[in-house]
Amino acid sequence: MKKYVKARKQGNSIVVTIPSNLGVTPGTKYKVEKRDNGEIIFKPSKKIVNSLDKLFEDWHGSYQSTTDLNDWENIKPVGEEIW
């Protein structure tokens, strides 16, 4: 599917509109690369999640804590820690 867009000047920038039917989420950040042959490549940058649910939504493994944390499992509070 080929789409054609036109670059236009807006202030001190050149803007290219992305058609909405390409499914780009507004606010997505891209790494931009211009090649010697004139091609401009847009690659989505690493997504930064804002919740633990989003961070682990595609993970279906099992969690295994490291052995250096085992002692913490059996420690009783000694002061005014929240328990």
Image: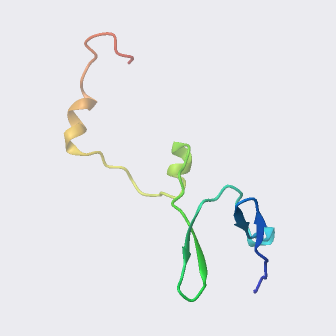
- Most distant residue in the bottom direction: 37
Residue drawn at the location 64% of the way across and 59% of the way down = 28
Residue drawn at the location 54% of the way across and 82% of the way down = 35
Q: In which quarter of the image is the N terminus?
A: bottom right
| Vertical comparison of 17 with 62: above or below | below
In the foreground, 83 or 35 = 35
Residue 12 is situated, as x and y percent measured from the top left of the image, at: 70, 60
- Most distant residue in the top direction: 80
In the foreground, 57 or 3 = 3
Question: Left of 47 or right of it: where is 2?
Answer: right
Task: Write down the quadrant of residue 6 in the picture.
Answer: bottom right
Count of numbered tags: 0
Residue 56 is situated, as x and y percent measured from the top left of the image, at: 50, 51
Question: Left of 29 or right of it: where is 20?
Answer: right
Q: Quadrant of the C terminus?
A: top left
- Most distant residue in the front direction: 12
Task: Write down the quadrant of residue 10 in the picture.
Answer: bottom right
Q: Which colour scheme is used?
A: rainbow
- Residue 24 seen from this side: no
Residue 24 is situated, as x and y percent measured from the top left of the image, at: 70, 65
| Vertical comparison of 41 with 80: above or below | below
| Vertical comparison of 42 with 2: above or below | above
- Residue 9 seen from this side: yes
Residue 42 is situated, as x and y percent measured from the top left of the image, at: 60, 72
Residue drawn at the location 51% of the way across and 50% of the way down = 55
| Vertical comparison of 3 with 71: above or below | below
